Amino acid sequence: MEQVISLISARSKELFFYSPYNFIRDFPNQKQLENCVEKEILHFEKGEDSVIYKIEIEGYVHEFFVSNLKWDSKYFNLNTCKLQYVLYSHNDISILENAVRKFLKIISESGIYCFIEIPSEDIKLIQALSGAGFKLIETRLTYFRGNLGEFKQERFPVRKAGLEDTKNLMRVAREMRNDYDRFHADPIFSEKIADEFLATYIEESLKGFCDIVLTSNEKNIPSDSFLTAKYLKSEWEKNGINISKMVLSAVSSSTNKGWYKKLVSEMTYHLKDEGAEYIFMNTQSTNRAVINVWESLGYKLGGTTHILSYHNF
Ligand SMILES: CC(C)(COP(=O)(O)OP(=O)(O)OC[C@H]1O[C@@H](n2cnc3c(N)ncnc32)[C@H](O)[C@@H]1OP(=O)(O)O)[C@@H](O)C(=O)NCCC(=O)NCCS
């Protein structure tokens, strides 16, 4: 335990950016580091599907915190793990790269596919991971807005989507492919599997994986678009700030063109009415239509992360 605490302290500057809310300046940095990063690292060992790989190079200890993703492994028929954190206390990139190589050798021997979402600020680790063989899959931007009381836009006809919309919205998710999302950009997944995964994601969202799914509700136009959101209410009290998240969307370009802005605007009203003080969401750096819409609704860039992945089989 003492060793982990000292490793956390050596990396606290970069680890802060692993907090999903690091761009919210009303949420004190130290509290974010403690609530959203340190607690997770310190409880890691107790997690049912988590493993810590300890690797020593030239006398320096490195700890790789890995979650085994059971659901993904089963769905993709691919032994999948997410590298959550790497702790160490030195400044030598070649030592770090050697530690990553050793880690990759161990997981490769077990036929594991591994990915990480890493903030741009953790640049040395990004360089060590890339040097050791991880590939860049996606560059992700986070946008956010507060001041929700001042949000004033024209209102649009939307409704809450339900289970009866499943088949249609799965079709929209499948058809509106985004070549740069993590699943379409990673060559380990075929295009068909990536399309199907996004269809499954909206199916699960309608079953309750997300708190709300909104769709268009206009006369004589089919409801061929959706936007999902999670309220994240279980975190509000502990963090002392109410932050919610918009998650997945797709808009049919043949029947619902232009509806994305209407859905984001209406979802902003909905989340505000649920009690959110801040809203955030992610997209790929390539998704100009999405960025255009968010900026037009007063959302601002919060930060950038990268998805890197590795497999050797
Ligand atoms: C992204 C998506 C939701 C947008 O749907 P849409 O509402 O029909 O979007 P539009 O084509 O009307 O574009 C929205 C705005 O961005 C602008 N825009 C579109 N492409 C642009 C580009 N390349 N550069 C700058 N602006 C662009 C449009 O002009 C429009 O602005 P305007 O209303 O001021 O004219 C839809 O294309 C989609 O489902 N894509 C696949 C899934 C996806 O990427 N989901 C989002 C993941 S975060």
Image (spheres, rainbow, N blue to C red):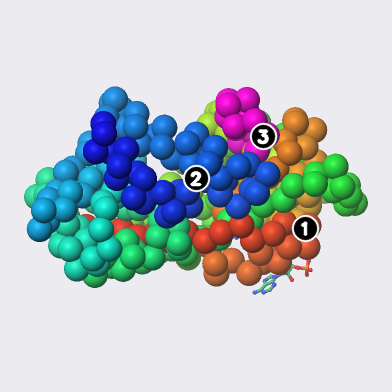
Q: What secondary structure is marked by label 3? A: loop
Verify whether residue 230 appears in magenta: yes
Q: Split into 4 quadrants, where in the image is the N terminus?
A: top left
Q: Is residue 10 left or right of residue 278?
A: left
Whether tag 2 and tag 1 are in contact, CB under 8 A, the answer is: no
Q: Residue at x 19, y 68 (%)?
A: 94
Q: Position of residue 57 (x, y in %)?
A: 12, 56
Count neighbours of disc 2 (C-alpha within 10 A) and say few if under 14, some if 14 to 19, many if 20 or more: some
Query: Dividing the image into 4 quarters, which one contains the C terminus?
Result: bottom left
Taking depth in this image into account, of 125 and 255 the one nearest to the observer is 125
Q: Which-is-in-front pick, marks 2 and 1?
A: 2
Q: Which residue is mark 3?
A: 241
Question: What range of the chain is rendered magenta?
Answer: 227-243
Q: Which residue is mark 2?
A: 19
In x, y percent, where is residue 241? 66, 34
153 w.r.t. 71: above or below:
below
How packed mark 1 is, by other alpha carbons closer than 10 Å (few <14, some 14-19, many 20 or more), is: some
Q: Label 1's element?
A: loop
Regarding mark 2 in the picture, which secondary structure is present there?
loop
Disc 1 marks which residue?
A: 298
In the image, residue 215 above or below residue 303? above
- Pick whichever, 312 or 171, lies toward us: 312
Disc 1 beta carbon < 8 A from ligand 1? no
User: At x 53% / y 31%, what residue is drawn?
Assistant: 209
Q: In the rendered structure, which amino acid carries the disc numbered 1? A: Gly
> Can residue 59 be found in the magenta stretch?
no
Name which quarter of the figure residue 206 lies in: top right
Q: Amino acid at mark 3?
A: Ile
